Structure formats: C-alpha cells, structure tokens
Image (cartoon, rainbow, N blue to C red):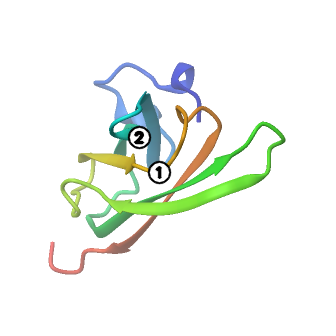
Amino acid sequence: MGLEAFPEIESFQKLPRQVIVKGGTSTFSHDQGAELRGIVINNIGHAICDVRVNVVIFDKKKLPVLSTSAATDPDALPQGGIGTFVFQLKNYPQEISDYYLYTNWKFNEKA
C-alpha cells in the first residue's frame, strides 16, 4: 500500500480492514550500519498482540539478501492503534532501499 493511498488521518474507515505496515526513512552510517523505521496501524476491528514486523531486503537484481523481524512498540495494539518499529542492521553495508514488509500478530483475547 503506497503512501498516496492513505486517506486523511481522521477517516480510518477508508483504510483496508487489515494490519497496515508502512516503512519510513532509511539511514546509513559507517559506524552504526543501516536503519529502517516505520509504523504499524491496526485496522482489523479487534485488538491484537505480539505484533512483529518482518522485512525482506532485496539486492539490485531483486534477489533477497536478508530477512529479519522486530517487535513493535507497543507490541499490543487496540483497534485503530499505531505502533512503531526500528530495524538496526549493523552489518548491512548500505542504505536500505528495496524491501518488503509484512506483519505477524495474534488476536488479543484479553482486551
């Protein structure tokens, strides 16, 4: 889902009924490696927990070179809740430019 598909922030009804993950900025420094930040929006209609974001990074030939995951902050999201994630890859030699993001989560039965 591209950024241009996001409606005005006050109308979550226009978003698809799914857990939406969107990557933000990617930075790189020789000392700290590559970093990718983004957000997760829970719009499935139920509270969720144990939310993890997975990233697959591709090289210039569109071949996967790295796959990893990170927990979101917070790791439990109510309906309409927004969480953040950060991937810090110290050994990755360049800025992350071609990647695919997806989420894993569970229904929060306690909410």
Res. 47 image quadrant:
bottom left
Tag 2, which secondary structure? strand
Residue 94 appears left or right of 74: right
The C terminus: image quadrant:
bottom left
Residue, x 45% and y 46% (percent of image)?
A: 20
Q: Label 2 belongs to which residue?
A: 33
Residue 61 appears left or right of 84: right
Residue type, mark 1 in image: Asn
The N terminus: image quadrant:
top right
User: Would you say residue 47 is visible in this rendering?
Assistant: yes
Query: What percent of the width, then of the height, locates residue 98?
Result: 65, 37
Tag 1, which secondary structure? loop
Query: What percent of the width, then of the height, locates residue 103?
Result: 47, 60
User: Would you say residue 42 is visible in this rendering?
Assistant: no
Residue, x 23% and y 47% (percent of image)?
A: 81
Circle nearer the N terminus (2, 1): 2
* Spatial separation of the CA atoms under disc 2 and disc 1: 6 Å
- The outermost residue toward the right is 61
Residue 71 appears left or right of 26: left
The label shown at residue 91 is 1
Residue type, mark 2 in image: Gly
Looking at this view, is 77 or 85 the one in front?
85
Query: What percent of the width, then of the height, locates residue 25?
Result: 42, 27
Query: What percent of the width, then of the height, locates residue 75?
Result: 23, 62
Res. 12 image quadrant:
top left
Q: Answer yes or no: do the residues labelled 2 and 1 have beta carbons within 8 Å?
A: yes
Residue, x 40% and y 56% (percent of image)?
A: 44
The label shown at residue 3 is none
Looking at this view, is 4 or 29 the one in front?
29
